[in-house]
DNA sequence: AAAGACACCTGTCCGC
DNA sequence: TGCGGACAGGTGTCTT
């Protein structure tokens, strides 16, 4: 489910309820996420959350004792509850704040994770080798061009590699390539610097627009208020196989690249 | 080093 | 209405 815009939407929604506030307790009803929720997560009890940050698709709850690392996987979401409610199906973990507000983590497929680290979360093995933030310094056409030299894999696969740039999942990779007019299957190493400048700009545009719309809800993404995101209305190719291209009217095509659905316009993208 | 397949798990949708 | 199969927003791990 969540790519960078959905995770950022979640972060913004829950930050006011956790930043500068103390955690009363953590309730784990189902520890079997992608990795078992560790017992050390109880280190969070009594800690004040200094900041809630996002790195790629990870959420980092920093405290003086360490940090909770959270990932939403394919189907995860976090809701804020201001009054007690009985947990529903797949609502595996609650972070209960001292003032009674709570974060409820839901993840039907359990591909997400909740971990604890006593050290710097950015040095954690899962985060340490991540590429630059697409909306931060260090990302741009030059970066993509440099890293892509000698690579023969499709540019879409390259763009979705978190060591190249974080946060770009299947929806936004498809959309950015459409906006940049680049064929997803084109070998990454055979694209010019100029075209990478355009691609980097397209990535930033589509991510910014999606964040502004509260993310993309395809089936089940909800924000911290339980509301869907509206960016699905602005998708040009993703999920639109057979429908006319918004640029030229040619039917949008569907293929498979690295086992992921790939949508493109054979006329607008080269 | 890089590329590709596979695994993890549940829900939903489609065709028969 | 039921059932099997394909597919879904991610990513670590293993094999070529």
Image (cartoon, coloured by chain):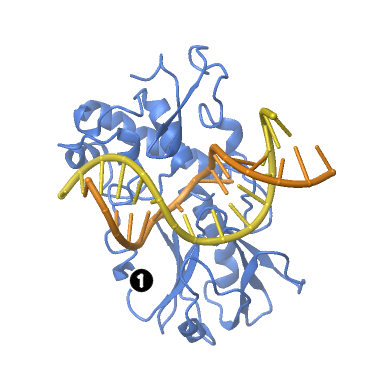
Chain colours: A blue, B yellow, C orange
- The percent coordinates of residue A225 (x first, y second) are 67, 57
- The percent coordinates of residue A70 (x first, y second) are 48, 66
Is there any visible trace of residue A258 in the rendered image?
yes
Classify mark 1: residues with Cα within 10 Å, few (<14), some (14-19) or many (20+).
many
Q: Nearer the viewer, residue A128 or A34?
A: A34
- The percent coordinates of residue A152 (x first, y second) are 21, 34
Say if A118 sits above or below A147 in the image: below
Q: How many marks?
A: 1
The residue tagged 1 is A121
For image coordinates 20% across by 38% down, the residue present is A148
Answer left or right for A163 relative to A171. left
For image coordinates 35% across by 24% down, the residue present is A183
- The percent coordinates of residue A249 (x first, y second) are 52, 12
Q: Nearer the viewer, residue A203 or A85?
A: A85
Residue A267, image quadrant: top left
Q: Secondary structure at mark 1?
A: helix
């Amino acid at each position: 489910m969540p790519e960078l815009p959905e995770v950022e939407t979640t972060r913004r929604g829950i930050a006011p309820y956790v930043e500068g506030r103390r955690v009363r307790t953590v309730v784990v009803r189902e520890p079997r996420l992608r990795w078992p929720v560790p017992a050390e997560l109880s280190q969070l009890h009594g800690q004040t959350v200094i900041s809630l940050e996002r790195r790629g698709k990870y959420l980092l709850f920093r405290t003086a004792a360490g940090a909770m690392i959270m990932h939403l996987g394919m189907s995860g979401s976090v809701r804020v509850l201001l009054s007690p409610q009985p947990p529903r199906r797949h609502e595996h973990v609650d972070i209960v704040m001292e003032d009674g507000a709570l974060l409820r983590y839901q993840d039907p497929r359990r591909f997400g994770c909740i971990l604890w680290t006593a050290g710097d979360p950015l040095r954690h093995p899962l985060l340490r080798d991540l590429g630059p933030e697409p909306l931060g310094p260090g990302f741009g056409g030059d970066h993509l061009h440099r890293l892509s030299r000698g690579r023969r894999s499709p540019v879409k696969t390259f763009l979705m590699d978190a060591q190249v740039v974080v946060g770009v999942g299947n929806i936004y990779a498809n959309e950015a390539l459409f906006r940049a007019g680049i064929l997803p299957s084109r070998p990454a190493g055979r694209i010019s610097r100029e075209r990478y400048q355009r691609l980097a700009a397209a990535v930033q545009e589509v991510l910014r627009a999606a964040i502004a719309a509260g993310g993309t809800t395809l089936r089940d993404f909800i924000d911290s208020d339980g509301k869907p995101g509206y960016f699905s209305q602005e998708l040009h190719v993703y999920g639109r196989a057979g429908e006319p291209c918004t640029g030229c009217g040619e039917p949008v095509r569907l293929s498979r690249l690295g086992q992921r659905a790939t949508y493109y316009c054979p006329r607008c993208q080269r």
